[in-house]
Each structure stands twice: as structure tokens, then as C-alpha cells.
Image: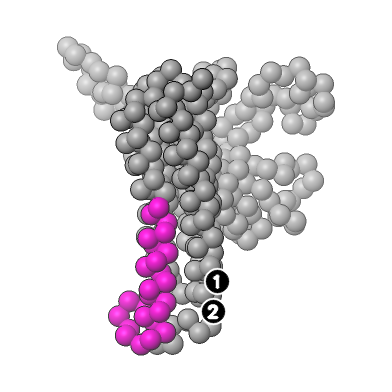
């Protein structure tokens, strides 16, 4: 039997999921209006921020309304966190995990809208691409904080090897030409391979599906996997002979974008029996882009990933 606080949590999260989907419908309606020729800025400006003519003011009002709508999940995530802390729902770990998963799933249309609109420039004028991506980054950071809060109360695990975990979540899908990009964010650096210590830790994953004609050979996989990974390497500037030596002083964390290269089962000789006998596939990490010692935001990393994909297409 669920206690009263647990029932309130379920009802609250269910209500947020429905409202999120309703707000997405409002955003779609706004996009339809913004695409109309009668709303295109007649003054020739990329964004009607200073023109006082009626059509431009109408466009600006719709943009402001849409910006308020995309902030909705940010507010609801904060409400969910406050309600969780206030009620201190403990002992119902499965219920709490289901509630959080439901809310993250309900946020998926927002991520998709923000990423696809900002990156593909679907509108006939500049719709504050930077601001839309800023909202996407805010939503990612807020959900990460929400997941950490639940994890700190031992209601879920961030360990990918655990049967019930919430190690990562999707932060948007978008179409780039013939490429369909699905982006996933790991709440904490996670071992690249579950059963083998490679020294690599994944922070983001991009699933890239190539459309007709985008693959150079039939042997290439339909979906390619790219990762943002970090690796601790010896710090060449570390002082030797120091009395107190910290881990951070002797190593430096470097960041890379690379591609999953399947090792086991062997991609050349594999058959159905190889997959049956293989508990967990293993792969190498083909480093494609060195990013230095500073961790990029999920938004910046995805920008770089898209540039890398477009560069590969042009080769």
C-alpha cells in the first residue's frame, strides 16, 4: 500500500507529464504561425527586435510566448524537487524512480523541439538560436541535479551495471541532412566498458543513423555510436618530491570525442552464435577530436559533434 505522500507524488508527476505534452501542442501551433508568410518580417531584419510595425510586433509576441512555454519544464522540475524534499518520500524507491523516469520522458519533446529548431533553423528568420540552446542546456542541468538528488537518497543508482539504474537520459533528437542524431547525457562519468577497465569514461553518447545514400558500403552499421569521453593521464607539470601529493596534482583529465569501434563480437567474422556467446559487446575508442582539459557543456559538445559529422560528409 502506498502512503498519502506517495500517492501525491504519483498524481503530481502524472499531472506534469500531461501539461508538458499540452504545452508541446501550443509550441507546434506557434511554429505554424511563425512559418506563415504574413508573419515574416517585412522590414528585412533577421529578428524583429527593434521594428514597431504590426507584423513584426506580432512575430515578436509569438516568440516571447514560445520562450515562456519552453521554460515550463524547468519550473516543474523545481516543483518536483521541492515536493520530493518536503515530503521526503523514502521507502518507495521503485515508485520514486518510476516518477522521475516519467517526468524525464515527458521532457523529451521539449529537448527535441529545442534541438531541432535551433540547429536546423526551421523558421524563416533567426529565432534566437543561442537562447533556444541555452534553454536546452538549462533543462539538461536541471534534470541532472534532479537525478543526483534522488541518487543521494539511495532511491536510484547511477551505476550502469545495476539492473535498475538511471545513468543517462536523452537530451534531444534532430535531423541533419541525411543524418538523424540522438544525444544522450550521462549523469556522471561512466566507464566506457562495463566489465573492462580501459581508463576511459563516457559523458555523452550520440547515436547517428545514416539515411539512404549516406553510407559508403553495405557493411557499415546502420547506427554509429560516438562518445564524449575523458581520460586521466600523468601530469607532465607535476612536482616531484613534494611532501603531500594529491591525485589531481599528478594527473590531468583530458576530453575527447571519438567513435565506438566494435571489437567483440568481431564485426568481420561475427555470426548469430558470436552474439549468443557474448554477454556484453566490447569496443575500442577511436579518438577523433581532442578537446583539452576543460569539460565542454552538452550543448558545446553536440555543436562539435555536428561539425565533425558534416566534415566527414564533405570528405
Circle 2 Cα neighbour tier, 10 Å, few/some/many (<14 / 14–19 / ≥20): few
Residue assigned mark 2: 36
The answer to which image quadrant residue 86 occupies is: top left
Check whether the beta carbons of the residues at disc 2 and disc 1 lie within 8 A of each other: yes
Examine the residues drawn in magenta and state their main secondary structure. helix
CA separation in Å, label 2 and label 1: 7 Å
Q: Is residue 115 visible?
A: no
Q: Is residue 26 visible?
A: yes
The answer to which image quadrant residue 292 occupies is: top left
Q: Residue at x 48, y 23 (%)?
A: 2
x and y percentages locating residue 105 in the rendered image? 53, 41
Q: Residue at x 34, y 42 (%)?
A: 78
Secondary structure type for disc 2:
loop
Secondary structure type for disc 1:
helix
Magenta region: which residues?
47-72
x and y percentages locating residue 284 in the rendered image? 59, 29
Asked if 257 appears above or below 68 in the picture, the reply is above
Residue assigned mark 1: 32
x and y percentages locating residue 117 in the rendered image? 51, 62
Q: Is residue 37 left or right of residue 8?
A: right
The quadrant of the rendering that contains the C terminus is: bottom right
34 part of magenta stretch: no
Q: Residue at x 47, y 37 (%)?
A: 11
259 and 182: which one is in front? 182
Q: Residue at x 48, y 44 (%)?
A: 15
Amino acid at each position: 500500500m502506498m502512503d498519502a505522500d506517495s500517492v501525491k507524488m504519483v498524481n503530481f508527476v502524472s499531472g506534469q507529464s500531461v501539461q508538458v505534452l499540452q504545452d508541446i501542442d501550443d509550441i507546434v501551433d506557434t511554429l505554424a504561425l511563425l512559418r506563415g508568410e504574413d508573419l515574416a518580417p517585412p522590414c528585412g531584419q533577421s529578428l524583429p527586435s527593434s521594428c514597431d510595425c504590426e507584423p513584426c510586433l506580432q512575430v515578436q509576441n509569438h516568440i516571447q510566448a514560445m520562450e515562456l512555454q519552453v521554460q515550463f519544464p524547468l519550473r516543474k522540475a523545481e516543483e518536483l524537487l521541492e515536493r520530493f524534499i518536503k515530503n521526503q518520500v523514502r521507502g518507495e524507491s521503485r515508485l520514486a524512480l518510476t516518477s522521475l523516469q516519467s517526468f524525464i520522458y515527458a521532457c523529451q519533446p521539449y529537448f527535441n523541439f529545442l534541438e531541432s529548431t535551433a540547429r536546423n533553423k526551421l523558421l524563416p528568420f533567426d529565432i534566437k538560436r543561442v537562447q533556444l540552446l541555452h534553454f536546452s542546456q538549462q533543462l539538461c542541468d536541471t534534470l541532472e541535479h534532479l537525478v543526483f538528488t534522488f541518487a543521494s537518497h539511495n532511491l536510484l543508482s547511477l551505476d550502469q551495471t545495476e539492473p535498475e539504474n538511471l545513468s543517462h537520459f536523452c537530451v534531444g533528437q534532430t535531423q541533419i541532412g541525411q543524418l538523424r542524431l540522438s544525444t544522450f547525457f550521462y549523469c556522471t562519468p561512466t566507464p566506457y566498458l562495463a566489465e573492462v577497465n580501459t581508463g576511459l569514461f563516457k559523458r555523452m553518447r550520440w547515436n547517428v543513423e545514416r539515411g539512404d545514400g549516406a553510407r559508403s558500403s553495405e557493411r557499415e552499421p546502420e547506427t554509429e555510436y560516438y562518445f564524449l569521453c575523458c581520460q586521466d593521464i600523468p601530469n607532465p607539470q607535476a612536482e616531484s618530491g613534494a611532501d603531500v601529493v594529491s591525485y589531481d596534482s599528478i594527473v590531468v583529465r583530458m576530453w575527447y570525442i571519438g567513435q565506438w569501434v566494435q571489437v567483440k563480437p568481431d564485426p568481420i567474422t561475427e555470426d548469430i552464435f558470436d552474439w549468443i556467446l557474448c554477454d556484453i559487446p566490447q569496443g575500442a575508442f577511436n579518438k577523433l577530436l581532442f578537446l583539452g582539459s576543460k569539460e565542454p557543456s552538452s550543448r558545446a559538445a553536440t555543436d562539435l559533434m555536428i561539425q565533425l559529422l558534416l566534415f566527414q560528409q564533405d570528405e
